[in-house]
Image: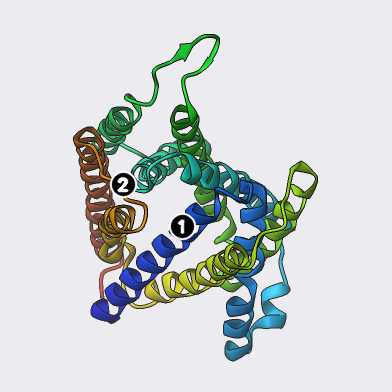
Amino acid sequence: MNPDRAIALKLASVLVFTVMASLIKAASAIVPAGEATFFRSFFALPPILVWLAWQGDVRSALRTENLLGHIWRGVLGVMGMVFGFAALGLLPFPEAVAIGYAMPLLATAFAAILLGEVVRMYRWSAILIGMVGVLVILWPRLSVVQNGGLTGGETLGALCSLASAALGALSIVATRRLVLSEKTSTIVLYFSLICSAGGLLTLPFGWVLPDLTTAAMLIAAGILGGIGQLLLTESYRHADTSTIAPFDYTSMLFALAIGYIVFAEVPTLVMLAGAAIVIAAGLFVIWREHQLGLERARARKVATPQG
């Protein structure tokens, strides 16, 4: 265990993923979300395959006992990416990132409903408070309906971002099932392969031929996505989840900086207040998970006394 190294790797992964998202946003004015999903997934494969080859793990990573589970997770991932990338093109960058913080809260709720995991009052309360924070962020965008349609692109973007968070949460639940029988390298590889295929299926729905600059941004986004996944995976080798998970929220600092410097976006006080509520709720859930882990460890120690 090396917590300092784990935190450094986690922060690096958060920064890489945030830069990746900013590249997708920059390209969103030209390419549709489905096309961006293909580039993000397909060009993540080279760094992943290099990493697997260095580990001597390419052949074993292709072996799976649950192909349908990988396909289901990949379908959820493709849909989540398409909605998320669409939201990036319609919303200010920090706002899209903030709504995405609903994902781990929804994942906890879905795990209780779909997997039967025990979630008690403390965490349910945190989930509800966190969703109130999401509603605070969404409220200015949800002017409901005027003239028989959505009031604007940002309203649609808010709904897309929330849909992406929900699909991402379901993907997390699917991953929790996969880890019971599948290696991490297998899960990572099949996810990129299936998402690449899923993104390619959107070809008939309006792909465009990007210019060289846009194509370079999309390819860079894919490569950064693969590198970010590897950094994230490696970080969990050196520390417990409860130690490094809170650093996910540093993405808001990166998003605020990139949004202001690159996209000239100034966050509203309402958005910042809602993000603060969601982050506080998420941190409480992480803390509660850590406490429950300590209690389970103590219970096992009492149940198996040393002779």
> Marks 1 and 2: which is nearer the front?
2
Is 306 left, or right, of 161 in this rendering?
left
What label does residue 246 carry, if any? none
Nearest the viewer among 236 and 305 is 236
Give the class, few, some or many, for how many residues have Cα within 10 Å of label 1's Cα (few <14, many ≥20): many
Residue 103 on image: x %, y %? 42, 44
Residue 291 on image: x %, y %? 22, 54
- Marks 1,2: beta carbons within 8 A: no
Return the residue at label 2.
265
User: Residue drawn 22% across and 40% down?
Assistant: 272
User: Residue drawn 29% across and 81% down?
Assistant: 5
User: Residue drawn 33% across and 53% down?
Assistant: 259
Q: Is residue 215 visible?
A: yes
> What's the residue type where badge 1 is placed?
Ala
Residue 19 on image: x %, y %? 41, 64
Is 218 left, or right, of 22 in this rendering?
right
Return the residue at label 1.
21
Q: Is residue 68 visible?
A: no
> What's the residue type where badge 2 is placed?
Glu
Residue 287 on image: x %, y %? 22, 52
Nearest the viewer among 253 and 135 is 253
Which image quarter: residue 37? bottom right
Q: Is 60 located above or below residue 90 in the figure? A: below
